[in-house]
Amino acid sequence: MGSDLIFLTLIILSWASFFSTKVEGIASARLLDLLIRDYTVKSFNWHWKTGTLYALHLPANLSGIEVDTVRFRCGSLRRYGAKVKEFHLGIGVIVHPCAERVIVVRQNLGLNWSSIYYANYDLSGYQLVSPVLGLLAYNAGSDVSLGSPFQLGVLARENPIKINFGENKMASNVTGLSTRPLCASFEGDGKVTLKNQASPNVCVVTRDGHFGLVVESPPLMPVRKKISRWKLAVGSSVGVALGAFLLGLLLVAIVIKVKKKARLEELERRAYEEEALQVSMVGHFRAPTASATRTTPTIEYQYINYHS
């Protein structure tokens, strides 16, 4: 469990390092789709075989994105289905409106460009643990190279489209997580739909769009900062000096208290002695005095007779 949390934290930190960087000035997921669409149309070759997957080489400003395209006849796609990298389109898939042919575009936005979906969708409380994969369709008529192609809809209500994230090397490491990720579908209205996986690393959807795997964000782990040696030495010296100062104050307080106690005892002793001896002032000196007692004189008998 601990290793899973560490691994997940590393994934989240690697994603967070990309969020602070603006990707070539493109901040809209919709704008990115249009740029990939236009480049796909410019790269379209009429000599490409129907049903064959071709990888496109994007310009440098879109580096990090993988794009593959394949052309189908709408009827054949519905009758036989198809496999476009991670996407498995089953029998019965419908492309609308489609007159004859369709261009299917598969996107893998990679770790960098997938961060756009954090700016365009509310993913608070969740973190992506896979690249965002896209499946889009455009018309492939005879005028496709003359103007901007319009987007078509792909529906698979009878036999859902399967997305196997395990076939993607960037998402295959999520297999080791103890918590199974959720399937995230990024809708066109800016909402995110979350649902459980159909099987490990496999999601099922009923239409075209963009998809990814997410997990709940773990609590932030405290980061221990490494303290340099000189800071440690200065801190230790300050601590020792402060401790010595406080110890000195304590010793001074103890000495003052002892002297004060001795002085009070001396004063009490003197007060007791003065009370016992009745000390009085004689000039500028203190001298003990005794209480006055007088003995009554007696006249001897012989003396009285003599005078009589």
Image (cartoon, rainbow, N blue to C red):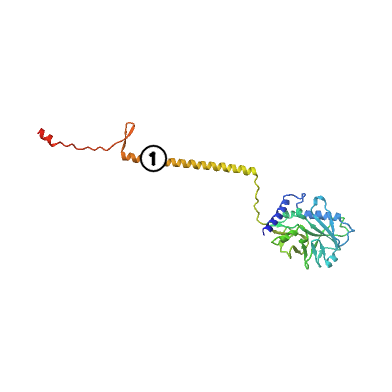
Q: Residue furthest front?
A: 302
Q: Which residue lies furthest to the left in this view?
A: 308
Whole-percent x, y for residue 223 in the image:
65, 51
Instruction: Name which residue lies at 80% across and 50% down.
Output: 61
Q: Residues within 10 Å of mark 1 (few under 14, many from 20)?
A: few
- When the figure is inspected, residue 170 is found, relative to residue 79, above or below; the finding is above
- When the figure is inspected, residue 9 is found, relative to residue 286, above or below; the finding is below
Judging from the image, what secondary structure is the residue with disc 1 in? helix
Number of numbered markers: 1
Whole-percent x, y for residue 305 in the image:
10, 35
Instruction: Name which residue lies at 52% across and 43% down.
Output: 247
Q: Which residue occupies the foreground of this view, 14 or 146?
A: 14
Q: Is residue 248 left or right of residue 2?
A: left
* Location of the N terminus (image quadrant): bottom right
Whole-percent x, y for residue 151 in the image:
81, 59
Residue 267 seen in render: yes
Please name the amino acid that badge 1 sits on.
Glu
- When the figure is inspected, residue 286 is found, relative to residue 56, above or below; the finding is above
Q: Which residue occupies the foreground of this view, 72 or 139?
A: 72
Whole-percent x, y for residue 55 in the image:
84, 57
Q: Residue furthest right?
A: 47
Residue holding disc 1: 266
* Location of the C terminus (image quadrant): top left
Instruction: Name which residue lies at 46% across and 40% down.
Output: 256
Residue 216 seen in render: no
Instruction: Name which residue lies at 86% across and 55% down.
Output: 43
